[in-house]
Image (cartoon, helix red, strand yellow):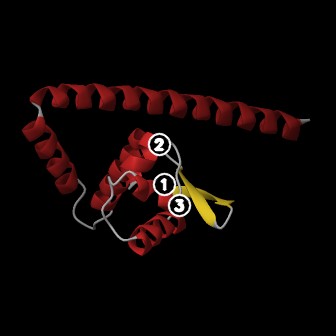
Amino acid sequence: MLQELWSRGSATVRELLADGQIRQAYTTVMTTVDRLYKKGMLNRTTEGRAFRYTPRQTPGEMQRVAAFEGIRQLLGSGAPTALPLSYLVEAVSEHDAQLLDELQLLVETKRRELQKRETREHTKNTNRDRNSNSKEQR
């Protein structure tokens, strides 16, 4: 149903069923889109006696969120930190060895960003401490 909504942009339950692509009962489709709405995946507006549903995210955004949540859950599983990371590396390497190089570049880029942020924060804290000390000496 999400695929249909993404391709249409928005639709009512009746519109989703009209072209025959979805072969489920009206009430099943209505329950499904209502659950997707309650989970925050769809927006809805009243249109007459029905609701018009619109996806809140693009397919790419939804995939990114799902991947992020899956990795977050894996890392928070209570296993030693290196173990879930090794699963990720293994899965990436089985899919495409070139992705390992891309993963390494992403890690190195993120590491540089974090180092720059830490340097800026350290400089800001040092300057704040100096200003505080000079005011105390007056």
Q: Amino acid at mark 2?
A: Arg
Q: As drawn, is 115 to the left or to the right of 87?
A: right
- Please name which of the two marks, 3 or 1, marks the residue nearer to the observer: 1
Mark 2 residue element: helix
Mark 3 residue element: loop
View extreme (right): residue: 138
Q: Nearer the viewer, residue 10 or 105?
A: 10
Q: Amino acid at mark 3?
A: Gly
The picture quadrant where one finds residue 107 is top left
Q: Nearer the viewer, residue 80 or 60?
A: 60
Residue drawn 27% across the image and 68% down it = 78
Q: Reading the chain from its start, which is encountered first: label 3 or label 1? A: 1
Crowd tier of the residue under label 1, counting other residues whose Cα lies within 10 Å: few below 14, some 14–19, many 20 or above? few
- Residue carrying label 1: 15
Q: Reading the chain from its start, which is encountered first: label 2 or label 1? A: 2
Q: Nearer the viewer, residue 130 or 59?
A: 59
Q: Reading the chain from its start, which is encountered first: label 2 or label 3? A: 2
Q: Amino acid at mark 1?
A: Glu
Crowd tier of the residue under label 3, counting other residues whose Cα lies within 10 Å: few below 14, some 14–19, many 20 or above? few
In percent of width and height, residue 29 lies at 41, 67
Cα–Cα gap, marks 2 and 3? 19 Å
- Residue carrying label 2: 8
- Please name which of the two marks, 2 or 3, marks the residue nearer to the observer: 2
- Please name which of the two marks, 2 or 1, marks the residue nearer to the observer: 1
Residue drawn 14% across the image and 25% down it = 98
In percent of width and height, residue 138 lies at 92, 35
Label disc, if present, on residue 40 of the rendered structure? 3
The reply to whether residue 115 is in sight is yes
Mark 2 and mark 1 residues within 8 Å of each other at the beta carbon = yes
